[in-house]
Amino acid sequence: GENVEQHPSTLSVQEGDSAVIKCTYSDSASNYFPWYKQELGKRPQLIIDIRSNVGEKKDQRIAVTLNKTAKHFSLHITETQPEDSAVYFCAAFSPTRGKLTFGQGTILTVHP
Amino acid sequence: GAGVSQSPRYKVAKRGQDVALRCDPISGHVSLFWYQQALGQGPEFLTYFQNEAQLDKSGLPSDRFFAERPEGSVSTLKIQRTQQEDSAVYLCASSLVLAGSFGETQYFGPGTRLLVL
């Protein structure tokens, strides 16, 4: 089945710096890759997603890149702000399994 | 519009008790998913409904776990004879269209935090 590995598990940056979180997946058929932000005690919220026919997608300070050959995708947050502090999860959708598999999460802390 | 809602938000159960967790998906959403999220981990798939049909229950940890969505809207996850290892946050998510061959955005509820003593 699909296996999604996420790194790093914790990331600490200064306000204004960039943050990068990386994920790898095992099922080459996976075709949809969402990123969720989860604040403490809150629901996971979709922040950006990318499909396998696209290599990069950007939304203001957030961007995602996908390398299908290497089976990895990354989340890039520029000009980080303290309110970006949260747990971020990547996920991969495999059509052969019909479900999302999540990474283990990255705790991002942005220091003022 | 209203998002996915779940109740109760918190549940404390004594070991051996049965619990029922409710999920109200976004109106009109066809697909409904249940996940279990252990502390410090990502959500783990439990089961999936397409309207009232339970298409995949491969993630249910044991036969003590049972889910239903009888009218294709509200869903209930039932855990019988709860054990301490069942303590986790149970998340429900819904999506507008069929999961099919292409992933679609899943909208999550706030979760039910279950503590089994």
Image: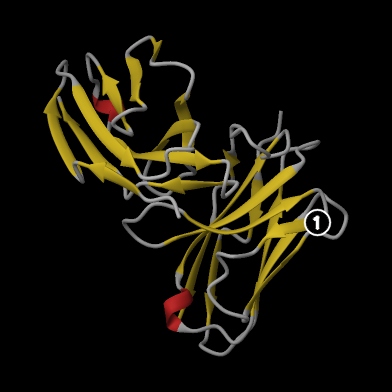
Image location of residue A90, percent across then percent down: 38, 38
Q: Quadrant of the N terminus of chain B?
A: top right
Is residue A100 something that shows in the picture? yes
Image location of residue B16, percent across then percent down: 56, 90
Q: Residue at x 70, y 34 (%)?
A: B2
Q: Quadrant of residue A26?
A: top left
Q: How many marks?
A: 1
Q: Which residue is mark 1?
A: B53
Image location of residue A81, percent across then percent down: 24, 21
Q: Which residue extends farthest right?
A: B71
Three-letter residue code for mark 1: Ala
Left or right relative to A77: residue B58: right
Is residue A38 something that shows in the picture? no
Q: Residue at x 57, y 69 (%)?
A: B60
Left or right relative to B28: residue A70: left
Q: Quadrant of the C terminus of chain B?
A: bottom left
Q: Secondary structure at mark 1?
A: strand
